[in-house]
Amino acid sequence: MRTTTTPATTTAGAPAVTDIAWNEAFCSEGANCFRFGLDAEGKAYIGTTGSAAYVTDSLDALRALISAVKAGAADHLLA
């Protein structure tokens, strides 16, 4: 795991800085790479390697998302 400092936005819209410990990227065919990370507060992050943008939520929400995807909840997106 490597730690990077990633810009974030606070709820007030002011720039903030969040230290995110990113896991090594998971890449599929065509270099579509996703990475998962955690910050010191335990928030989970999902991002791509080609962009500084990311999605964040609680660790429990990330677990629920991954479980749902593994169970086939997103299979319709692959057709």
Image: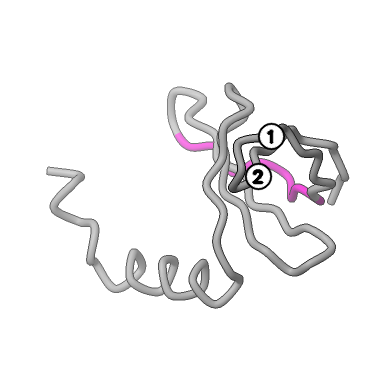
Q: Residue at x 36, y 68 (%)?
A: 70
Left or right: where does residue 2 sit relative to residue 78?
A: right
- Disc 2 marks a residue whose amino acid type is Thr
Disc 2 vs disc 1: Cβ atoms closer than 8 Å?
yes
Question: Callout 1: helix, strand or loop?
Answer: loop
| Residue at the spot 24% in from the left edge and 67% down from the top edge | 72
Residue located 79% across and 48% down the image? 20
52 drawn magenta: no
Q: Which residue is mark 2?
A: 10
- The quadrant in which the C terminus is found is top left
**Apparent side of residue 8 relative to residue 68 in the rendered image (left or right):** right
Q: Within the image, what quadrant is residue 71 found in? A: bottom left
Q: Position of residue 62 (x, y in %)?
A: 51, 67
Q: Position of residue 67 (x, y in %)?
A: 40, 74
Q: Circle 1 sits on which residue?
A: 14
Colouring: one colour
Residues rendered magenta in the picture: 21-28
At 70% across and 53% down in the image, what residue appears? 37
Categorize mark 2 by other alpha carbons within 10 Å: few (<14), some (14-19), many (20+). Answer: few
Q: Is residue 61 left or right of residue 22?
A: left
Check disc 1 and give the amino acid type.
Ala
Using the rendered view, name the quadrant where residue 74 is placed: bottom left
Tag 2 secondary structure: loop
